[in-house]
C-alpha cells in the first residue's frame, strides 16, 4: 500500500500562541472523519490513550506495547508486540496488552548459531526481542493503524479490528524466514500475568488463554483467544520458563515466559485474533462470526473497510464546520475517544460472564463492561445518551445486571469484578442521568430500588463491594467521617476522603431526589433533597486562607463531629485527588447555598476569578491554562487553582454562569480548549475512558451538563461556526455561531433557540431534540444571561 506522509503535529508552543495570532483563521472544510481522527493524540504525558485499531465500543483492540503501563507512548523507541486488549485513558497500572504478537525474522533453534537460541529463555522475553520502528509513514486513523519495524530486515505492520476480533497484516521485506511470536506470558508494563496457555491447533490456528491481575491491583480475570492465519504455518515451537522447543504444540502454567513461534514461507501474512471473556468456545465463535464468511477467512481490507464504515457513521453523528484542520482533527479525535468505551462484553452468541462468575446470555441486547464511573458520570455518559441512545440503554441495563448478579451497584467495574477504585457515589448520578435521557424506560422501578438501597445501606462485609462505606456517619450525622484507618476492600474507601465523599454523596442524593419526584415518591424526594444539602455539614465558615484572603471552605470532620486539625484549604487531608479549593465548587446542585456560604454572588465571583487566574487569562489564555492551571497528572494536592487534568472540578467553568456571570464561562472554556491539540500530548491528564474528550466535545459545541439529573445544558460560546448533531429518533440539532474564531476569546452576545430569543444560560434536553441554537458572538463581554431568572433553579436549594 502507498505510504502516507507522517502526520503533522502542532506543538505545545504553537498552542501557547494560537489565541493571539493575527488575521482570520484558515477555515477547514469538513473531511472524512475517519481520516480526521489522530489516534496518536493522548499517547504522551499520561493521556494514556492507545494508538492502535478498535471498533466503536469494541471488545478487541490491536495496539503496540512499549515501556508504559498504559501500553505505548509516542517517544518509545521499540515495540514489544501488538496486544489485543487495551483501555483508553485509564490511570491505574494494569491496563491490558494481553495476547501480544510480534512479527520477527530469523532462525529459531538450540545453540548460538540460531538467531533465537531456544536454550536461552531470555531470548523469548519481549524486552529482548522487541523491534525498533519509525514514525515516518506511521498512520493512526479510526479503525486502522500502520507502522514500520526497522529491525528484522524491515517489516510493515498494519492493524484493524471488528468488535470482537483484531486483524494484523505483516509484510516482510527480507529474505530470512518470517515468524510471528505469540506471547501469552507478558503484557503491558506493570500488567502482571498470573497464568497462561497456548496451543498450536493446526497449520492455520493457535488458541490459548491469559489470566491477569486487573486494574489497580484488583482480582484475577481470564481472557481466551483464537488466532487464525491466512497462510499455512511451515514450522512452529513453543516456549516456557525453561526455554523453547521446536514442534511442541502446547504449553501452559502459571507466571513466567510463555508463548509460541510460528514460521511462514510467505512474504505477507494476515493474523485474525478473536477474544472472549467467557471461554474458548466463545473466542472460536467470535472468530467465526466476525472473521470469516461462510468459513472463509475475511481479508484484512474487508474488515478494515467494514469497521471504518461503522466509524464513519458513528463519527458522523456530529459534523462541525469552521476552524483549522487541526481544530477539525481535535474534535474528531475527541469524539472517537468518547466512542471507544465501555467495552462490549457479550460474545457473538450473547453469552457473557457475570459478576456472579456464572455464564449468562444477553438476548437481544449487548452486555458491556469496564465502567470508570467516578470519571464518566460527569461528561461521557451524557454524550453517549444523546448520540447513541440504544447503546446507552444497553449500558444502563448492564449496570443494573451487575447489581442483580453481583449483589450491589458498582463504582469502578473492571471485567467482571468490582475494584472499589475511587470514592463517593458516582453510580447514582450516572444512572439518574441515563434515566433522564430516556435510557431506563421500563426499568425505572428496578433502577430506583437499586439506587435507593445503595444510598441507604452498606454492603455486607463478605460482599466484594464497598458501596457507600461512609453511610453510617453520613446518615446519622450528615457527613462521612474522616478516618484514614477505616478498613478497605480495594484501592480506596470513602472515609479515607471524608470531606470529598460527603460532597459526592450530597450531589448523588440530589440527583436521586429528582428521579424520586418524577416517579411520584414525593416523601423520598424531599428527604433526598435535604440530603443533597449535606455538603453544608462539612463547610467550616471559620477556615481562612490568608494568602488569598478568603474565609469559609469545606473541611473534613472526624467521627465525633470535630473538625480535622491542623487544616488549610490546600491540604490533602480528607479530599480525594483534590483540595478544598477545588471541591468547594462540587455544589452545583445548591448554588444559592454556596453563594450564601461564601458571602454573596460578588464574593463567589472573586473566588472563581482567583481560582482560574482570570485576570491573567484575559491577557494570555493559553499560557495561563498551561502554566497556572496544569500540574503533574498525578499531583492533586497543595493547589488552589483549577485542575483541568482531573475530574472533581471539570464543571466549574460553568459555575460562573450559575452565579450570573456567563461571559466568564465562555472565556475559561475557550482557554481550556487550548490544552487539547492535534499532537501526542494533546490530551490534558488521563483521558479516563473518554471523560476529558467528552468535556472537549461538549465545550466546543457550547453546552455542558453541569448539574446531574436535571437534563439541563449550560451554554458557552461555541468553538465552531456550525455543528449538526444527529439525535436518533428525531430531527438533528443545529448549532450556529457565525464568526466563531477558536484562536481568541469570544463571548455570547445573543442566543436564539428554535428561532426565538433566549436569555436563559441553559437549555433543556427537550429543546435539543429537533431544535436549533443560534449564537451571535462578540469579542467583548455582554450582559446576555445576566438578568433575573437567567440561571436555572438549583434542584436542591432550600426553598
Image: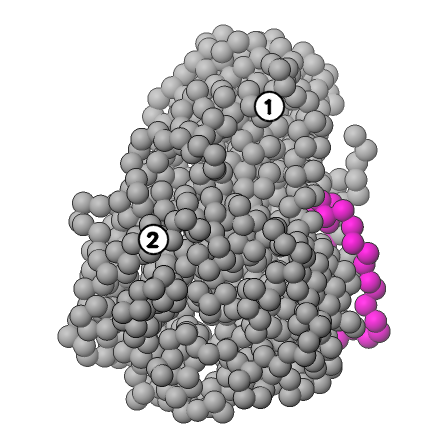
Task: Say which residue appears at 19% left-offset and 79% top-offset.
Answer: 562
Quadrant of the drawing holding the N terminus: top right
Task: Say which residue appears at 68% left-offset and 69% top-offset.
Answer: 754
Q: Earlier in the sequence, mark 1 or mark 2?
A: 1
Badge 2 crowding class, 10 Å Cα cut-off, few under 14, some 14 to 19, many 20 or more, is few
Colour scheme of the rendered structure: one colour
Task: Say which residue appears at 50% left-offset and 21% top-offset.
Answer: 285
Most extreme residue toward the front is 520
Is 29 within the magenta?
Answer: yes
Q: Main secondary structure of the magenta part?
A: loop
Tell me the number on the disc at residue 445: 2
What secondary structure is marked by label 2?
A: helix
- Measured as percent of width and height from the top left, residue 508 is found at 36, 65
- Measured as percent of width and height from the top left, residue 709 is found at 44, 65
Mark 1 — residue? 291
Q: CA distance from mark 1 to mark 2?
A: 40 Å
**Which segment is the magenta one?**
9-37
Amino acid at each position: 500500500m502507498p505510504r502516507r506522509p507522517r502526520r503533522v503535529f502542532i506543538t505545545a508552543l504553537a498552542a501557547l500562541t494560537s489565541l493571539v495570532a493575527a488575521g482570520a483563521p484558515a477555515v477547514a472544510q469538513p473531511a472524512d472523519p475517519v481520516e480526521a481522527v489522530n489516534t496518536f493524540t493522548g499517547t504522551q504525558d499520561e493521556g494514556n490513550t492507545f494508538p492502535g485499531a478498535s471498533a466503536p465500543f469494541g471488545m478487541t483492540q490491536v495496539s503496540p506495547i512499549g515501556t508504559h503501563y498504559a501500553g505505548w507512548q509516542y517517544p518509545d523507541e521499540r515495540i514489544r508486540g501488538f496486544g489485543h486488549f487495551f483501555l483508553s485513558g485509564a490511570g491505574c497500572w494494569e491496563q491490558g496488552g494481553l495476547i501480544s504478537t510480534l512479527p520477527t525474522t530469523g532462525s529459531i533453534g538450540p545453540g548460538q548459531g540460531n538467531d533465537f537460541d531456544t536454550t536461552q529463555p531470555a531470548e523469548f522475553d519481549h524486552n529482548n526481542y522487541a523491534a525498533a520502528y519509525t514514525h515516518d509513514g506511521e498512520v493512526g486513523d479510526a479503525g486502522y493503524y500502520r507502522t514500520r519495524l526497522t529491525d528484522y530486515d524491515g517489516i510493515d505492520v498494519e492493524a484493524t479490528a471488528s468488535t470482537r476480533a483484531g486483524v494484523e497484516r505483516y509484510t516482510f521485506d527480507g529474505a530470512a524466514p518470517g515468524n510471528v511470536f505469540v506471547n501469552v506470558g507478558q503484557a503491558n508494563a506493570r500488567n502482571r500475568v498470573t497464568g497462561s496457555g497456548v496451543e498450536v491447533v493446526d497449520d492455520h490456528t493457535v488458541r490459548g488463554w491469559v489470566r491477569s491481575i486487573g486494574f489497580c491491583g484488583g482480582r484475577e480475570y481470564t481472557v481466551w483467544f483464537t488466532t487464525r492465519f491466512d497462510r499455512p504455518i511451515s514450522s512452529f515451537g513453543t516456549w516456557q520458563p525453561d526455554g523453547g522447543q521446536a514442534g511442541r504444540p502446547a504449553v501452559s502454567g502459571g507466571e513466567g515466559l510463555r508463548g509460541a513461534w510460528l514460521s511462514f514461507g510467505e512474504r505477507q501474512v494476515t493474523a485474525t485474533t478473536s477474544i472472549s471473556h467467557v471461554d474458548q468456545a466463545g473466542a472460536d465463535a467470535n472468530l467465526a462470526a466476525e472473521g470469516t464468511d461462510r468459513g472463509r477467512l475475511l481479508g484484512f481490507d474487508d474488515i478494515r473497510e467494514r469497521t471504518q464504515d461503522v466509524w464513519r457513521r458513528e463519527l458522523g453523528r456530529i459534523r462541525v464546520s469552521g476552524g483549522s484542520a487541526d481544530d477539525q482533527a481535535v474534535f474528531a479525535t475527541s469524539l472517537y475517544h468518547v466512542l471507544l468505551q465501555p467495552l462490549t462484553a457479550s460474545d457473538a452468541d450473547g453469552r457473557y460472564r457475570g459478576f456472579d462468575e456464572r455464564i449468562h446470555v444477553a438476548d437481544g441486547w449487548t452486555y458491556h463492561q469496564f465502567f470508570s464511573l467516578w470519571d464518566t458520570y460527569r461528561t461521557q455518559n451524557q454524550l453517549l445518551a444523546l448520540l447513541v441512545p440504544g447503546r446507552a440503554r444497553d449500558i444502563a441495563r448492564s449496570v443494573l445486571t451487575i447489581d442483580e448478579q453481583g449483589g450491589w451497584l458498582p463504582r469502578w467495574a473492571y471485567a467482571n469484578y468490582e475494584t472499589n477504585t475511587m470514592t463517593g457515589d458516582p453510580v447514582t448520578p450516572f444512572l439518574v442521568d441515563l434515566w433522564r435521557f430516556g435510557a431506563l424506560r421500563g426499568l425505572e422501578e428496578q433502577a430506583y430500588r437499586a439506587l435507593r438501597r445503595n444510598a441507604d445501606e452498606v454492603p455486607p462485609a463478605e460482599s466484594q463491594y464497598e458501596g457507600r462505606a461512609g453511610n453510617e456517619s453520613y446518615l446519622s450525622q450528615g457527613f462521612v467521617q474522616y478516618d484514614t484507618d477505616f478498613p478497605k476492600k480495594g484501592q480506596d474507601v470513602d472515609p479515607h476522603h471524608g470531606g470529598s465523599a460527603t460532597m459526592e454523596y450530597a450531589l448523588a442524593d440530589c440527583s436521586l431526589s429528582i428521579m424520586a419526584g418524577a416517579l411520584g415518591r414525593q416523601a423520598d424526594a424531599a428527604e433526598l433533597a435535604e440530603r443533597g444539602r449535606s455538603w453544608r455539614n462539612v463547610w467550616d465558615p471559620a477556615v481562612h486562607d490568608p494568602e488569598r484572603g478568603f474565609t469559609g471552605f469545606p473541611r473534613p470532620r472526624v467521627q465525633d463531629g470535630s473538625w480535622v486539625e491542623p487544616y488549610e484549604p490546600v491540604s490533602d487531608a480528607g479530599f480525594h485527588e483534590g483540595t478544598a479549593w477545588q471541591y468547594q465548587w462540587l455544589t452545583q446542585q445548591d448554588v444559592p447555598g454556596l453563594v450564601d456560604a461564601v458571602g454573596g454572588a460578588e464574593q463567589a465571583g472573586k473566588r472563581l476569578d482567583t481560582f482560574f487566574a482570570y485576570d491573567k487569562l484575559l491577557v494570555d489564555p493559553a499560557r495561563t491554562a498551561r502554566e497556572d492551571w496544569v500540574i503533574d497528572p498525578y499531583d492533586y494536592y497543595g493547589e488552589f487553582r483549577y485542575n483541568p487534568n482531573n475530574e472533581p472540578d471539570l464543571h466549574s467553568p460553568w459555575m460562573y454562569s450559575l452565579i450570573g456571570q456567563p461571559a466568564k464561562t465562555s472565556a475559561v472554556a475557550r482557554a481550556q480548549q487550548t490544552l487539547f491539540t492535534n499532537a501526542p500530548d494533546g490530551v490534558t491528564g488521563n483521558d479516563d475512558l473518554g471523560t476529558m474528550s467528552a468535556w472537549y466535545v461538549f465545550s466546543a459545541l457550547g453546552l455542558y451538563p453541569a448539574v446531574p439529573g436535571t437534563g439541563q445544558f449550560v451554554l458557552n460560546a461555541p468553538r465552531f461556526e456550525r455543528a449538526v448533531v444527529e439525535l436518533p429518533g428525531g430531527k438533528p440539532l443545529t448549532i450556529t455561531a457565525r464568526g466563531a474564531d477558536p484562536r481568541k476569546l469570544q463571548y455570547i452576545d445573543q442566543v436564539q433557540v428554535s428561532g426565538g430569543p433566549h436569555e436563559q444560560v441553559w437549555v433543556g434536553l427537550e429543546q435539543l431534540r429537533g431544535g436549533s441554537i443560534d449564537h451571535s458572538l462578540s469579542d467583548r463581554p455582554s450582559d446576555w444571561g445576566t438578568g433575573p431568572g437567567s440561571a436555572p433553579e438549583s434542584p436542591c436549594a432550600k426553598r
